[in-house]
Image (cartoon, rainbow, N blue to C red):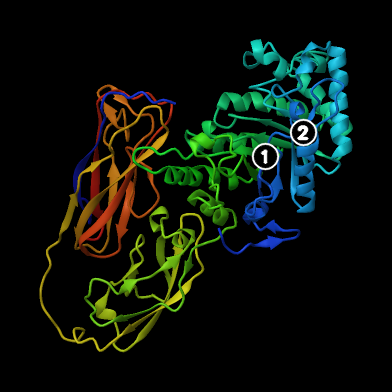
């Protein structure tokens, strides 16, 4: 006993048994609109896409167009230097955007890929002349481009055959004209002169268009972000850049999204708006979890980091429908070939529109026994209700009004109403409770729920005697995270149950890891996982460490209260795993300040 409080502890072992290291081989619904058919998105941001523009769901989900391949020089140019341009597909995308009042993002003028093969044989002077003709032709044909991707992938795929990505047989189709634009260190000696000159030309031909730089695997890498910032700041000195693009492909977002957030902050500090330009998220089944659920989990993990960032203007999803998605084999489409939205699409549709769960109106419950285990369960609906898959969502309930004396409580995770203080319950009375529910992103409006009491025969004003000994009791079930699979980015989840009895006026259940060297991380001999184990009670998941992490608090006594504890171990695709069992002993503490 310390001070006026009491503490009881239990130690729990969290194990993941692994076999020998394996080798992996590779809404329907109402349509909200504004203006010329724009879907209404929260935070005044836009959501775009790249193909199958005429499918029924496109204008329901998206309000920005980027041509996936039609705007690449190699697609639009003729087969020979003198052949006619091939504008048909690009015309269709541009016209669709204009007709439907959608923003148009041109992809792309200069890139070390999918370029006219005949460019490779030209001397630099002729290459520069052809570049200018290309810029001029686009400017003349498409005067209402909103954003223009002047240079794409300067760090990873420049138009320079000396670059590792563009050597050998790739050279002709990848472009070798960086030297025609000034090379790395030409007149200006910036190290990026060819980019600077490309933007200078774009400013001449597109004086009223917002000019854009684009690349992949930037915000997941501190060093790539540093290089990218060098280019951005060179362009800023001449007011040549209006937008910064981070593609956001699935292979770039397998790691910790906190790294992306930190590097988005670094990019935003330049004052140049950011766009997520080529987002795709795979849906490959893993660890017994179906592919569409894996995809949904990653949409929830990835999209809010990008969407909520104040520096991000919007997101372009790079493909959306089976089978015409460049990552169809990885189950990245969010809509099936019959136009049925997958769970990730339904979640995204509601998330970007800030659609919260809706508590059903006119719910009424009756209390005939003040000591019954529950009054009833409050019900709310969301996108998961529409497809009868409530297991795909997580609700958190709260009583937000009409309960000043705390007579009633609601189980946060289930919506079960209970009588917490039967001695204060009045007979033949109707209580009006205001309840709200959150899906983890958006919270419902408060809704009145009626609770009526009958003639409560077991609630009488009479004195009764008895004493209760001070008691704190904590029991824990076992927990296993299953088998870790090397080479696959995955969250491994499990649950266990804490059984709590407390006679105190308050109590708190917390968890710590007393290990100093590997706090919170599962260990296998001398090896430890990179990321700490995450644990949650009724709140959000968070890492276990040497400092106590509160999982649940009680504002009164409880008896054999079964609290579900969620545990998650995140493992990256590139994290090395050692054969054998990973385990960790955690200390769970039940404590009180008012015994």
* Image: 539 above or below 409: above
Indicate the position of residue 115 as horizontal and vertical percent values: 74, 23
Q: Nearer the viewer, residue 398 or 92?
A: 92
Cβ atoms under marks 2 and 1 closer than 8 Å: no
* Earlier-in-chain disc, 2 versus 1: 2
* Image: 8 above or below 420: above
Determine whether the residue tagged by mark 2 lies in a helix, strand or loop. loop
Q: Nearer the viewer, residue 320 or 205?
A: 320
Residue 25, image quadrant? top left
Q: CA–CA distance between discs 2 and 1?
A: 11 Å
Circle 2: is it few (<14), some (14-19), or many (20+) Cα within 10 Å? many
The residue located at (50%, 62%) in the rendering is 443
Q: Is residue 154 visible?
A: yes
Q: Is residue 449 left or right of residue 245?
A: left
Q: Quadrant of the C terminus?
A: bottom left
Q: Nearer the viewer, residue 54 or 119?
A: 54
Residue 277, image quadrant? top right
């Amino acid at each position: 006993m310390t001070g006026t409080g009491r503490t009881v502890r239990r130690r729990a072992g969290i194990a993941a048994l692994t076999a020998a290291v394996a080798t992996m081989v590779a809404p329907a619904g109402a349509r909200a609109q504004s203006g010329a058919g724009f879907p209404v998105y929260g935070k005044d941001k836009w959501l775009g896409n790249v193909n199958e523009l005429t499918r029924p769901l496109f204008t329901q989900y998206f309000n920005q167009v980027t041509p996936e391949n039609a705007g690449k020089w190699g697609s639009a140019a003729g087969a020979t230097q003198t052949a006619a341009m091939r504008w048909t597909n690009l015309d269709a995308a541009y016209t669709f955007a204009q007709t439907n009042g959608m923003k148009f993002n041109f992809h792309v003028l200069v890139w070390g890929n999918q370029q006219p093969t005949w460019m490779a044989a030209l001397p630099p002077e002729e290459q520069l002349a052809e570049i200018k003709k290309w810029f001029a032709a686009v400017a003349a044909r498409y005067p209402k481009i909103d954003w223009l991707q002047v240079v794409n992938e300067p760090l990873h795929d420049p138009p320079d055959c000396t670059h590792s990505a563009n050597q050998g047989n790739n050279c002709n189709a990848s472009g070798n004209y960086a030297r025609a634009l000034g090379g790395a260190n030409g007149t200006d000696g910036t190290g990026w002169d060819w980019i600077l000159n490309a933007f200078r030309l774009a400013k001449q031909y597109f004086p009223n268009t917002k000019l854009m730089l684009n690349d992949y695997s930037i915000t997941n890498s501190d060093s790539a972000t540093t290089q990218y910032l060098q280019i951005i700041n060179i362009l800023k000195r001449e007011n040549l850049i209006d937008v910064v693009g981070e593609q956001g492909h699935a292979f770039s977002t397998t790691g910790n999204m906190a790294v992306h957030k930190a590097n988005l902050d670094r990019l935003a500090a330049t004052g140049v708006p950011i766009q997520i330009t080529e987002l795709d998220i795979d849906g490959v089944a893993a660890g017994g979890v179906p592919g569409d659920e894996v995809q949904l989990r990653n949409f929830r993990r990835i999209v809010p980091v990008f969407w909520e960032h104040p520096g991000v203007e919007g997101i372009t999803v790079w493909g959306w429908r089976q089978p015409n998605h460049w990552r169809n084999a990885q189950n990245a489409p969010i809509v099936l070939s019959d136009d049925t939205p997958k769970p990730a699409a339904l979640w995204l549709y509601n998330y970007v529109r800030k659609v919260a769960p809706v508590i059903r109106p006119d719910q009424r419950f009756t209390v005939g026994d003040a000591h019954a285990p529950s009054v009833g369960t409050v019900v709310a609906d969301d996108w998961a209700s529409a497809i009868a898959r409530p297991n795909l969502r997580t609700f958190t309930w709260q009583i937000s009004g009409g309960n000043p004396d705390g007579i009633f409580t609601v189980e946060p995770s289930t919506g079960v109403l209970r009588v917490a203080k039967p001695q204060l319950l009045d007979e033949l009375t109707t209580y009006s409770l205001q309840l709200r529910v959150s899906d983890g992103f958006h919270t419902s409006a408060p809704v009145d729920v009626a609770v009526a009491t009958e003639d409560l025969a077991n609630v009488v004003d009479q004195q009764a005697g008895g004493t209760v000994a001070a008691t704190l009791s904590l029991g824990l079930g076992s927990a296993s995270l299953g088998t870790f699979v090397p080479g696959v980015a995955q969250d491994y989840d499990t649950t266990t149950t804490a059984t709590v009895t407390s006679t105190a006026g308050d109590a708190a259940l917390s968890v710590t890891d007393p290990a100093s060297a590997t706090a919170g991380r599962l260990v296998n001999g001398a090896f430890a996982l990179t990321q700490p184990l995450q644990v949650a009670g009724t709140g959000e998941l968070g890492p276990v460490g040497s400092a106590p992490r509160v999982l649940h608090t009680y504002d009164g006594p409880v008896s054999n209260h079964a609290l579900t504890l969620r545990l998650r171990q995140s493992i990256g695709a590139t994290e090395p795993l050692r054969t054998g069992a990973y385990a960790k002993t955690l200390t769970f503490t039940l404590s009180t300040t008012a015994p």
